[in-house]
Amino acid sequence: ADQRMDDGMAMVFDAAELQHELEILGRPVFEVELTCDKPKAMLFAQLSDVSPDGAVSRISFGVKNVTQAAGDQRIEYLQEGKRVRVRVLLNYCAHRFTKGHRIRLSLANSQWPMFWVSPEINTLSLDLSTATVRLPTYRGPAIAGPNPQPETAAPTPLTVLRAGFVDRSITYDIVKDEWTCITDGVGGVFGEGVYRFDEIGTAVEHNLRRELRLSNKDPLSARYDIKQKMKMGRPGWEADIDIDTRQTCDANYLYVTAEIQAKMNDEIVFEKNWSRQVYREGM
């Protein structure tokens, strides 16, 4: 997906227009010294390819919990005004930047809903004179390699009983200063629809609604709800499962609650409700 909307809410650095193509293969790394005005923060870094028409394609990204700048096994809460050096390892990638394109680095202190937000609104102050970006450039011979399309087994005979769909939307409430991301799907997140395995006569249906909300004014408003329904059956029996899961938070804990109900031929055969809380150590 085009990254221009996210980049509009990030600090963005564009390199000069490439005069020749550049290939990378490996793991990009970004390092910088910074200070923070709050004890907890994260640093998100994204590498993108900017086309001449302005379209932005994400190539790789990485995130670092700044309280773990000294190592993943140590948590050191940040002190206002005290510098720390942060190293962000981006995901392994392989990409060819073509002539006329630009390389972009985007930085942010949040990336909702990909990562849960810090408990307080914070400001990262970066010393750009200490910043480095290392790209794993590739200058070897062209690699023919295997066919990029994997070999698959013959498709299972099935009949689509009802076409599926997936609707994804992002809305912004100007009054509440709130973002809402919604996924609605018949056939799960891939929209396979309702179908029947012809060899055994079993019909399968998986529907879901996923909703994520966050107010720009309040990081503790973060909320993730997902409702799922799974049905499976054939003449004589039908299993029906409903699952509701929710994640919320406060300044000290993350809260997860879930409910599940299973029916066989419309009779409840299993129910369970549970909740967990996880201390936000360094998060």
Image (cartoon, grey):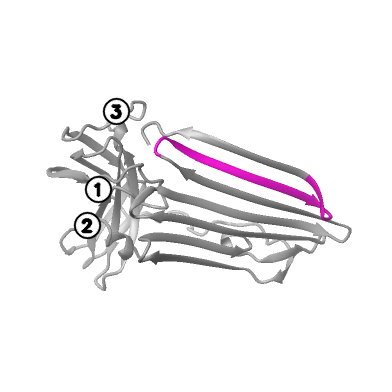
Closer to the camera, 23 or 190? Answer: 190
Closer to the camera, 33 or 279? Answer: 279
The part of the chain drawn in magenta is 251-269
> Which residue is the site of mark 3?
76
The residue lying furthest to the front in this view is: 175
Q: In this view, does 179 lie above or below 130?
A: below
> Which residue is the site of mark 1?
135
Using a 10 Å C-alpha cutoff, classify the residue at mark 2 as few (fewer than 14 neighbours), some (14 to 19) or many (20 or more): some
Q: Which SS type dominates the magenta stretch?
A: strand
First of labels 1, 2 by sequence position: 2
> Which residue is the site of mark 2?
12
Q: Which amino acid does label 1 sit on?
A: Leu
Q: Is mark 3 on a helix, strand or loop?
A: loop
Q: Does the stretch in magenta take in 267?
A: yes
Count up the numbered dots. Answer: 3
Q: What residue type is labelled 3?
A: Glu
The residue lying furthest to the right in this view is: 236
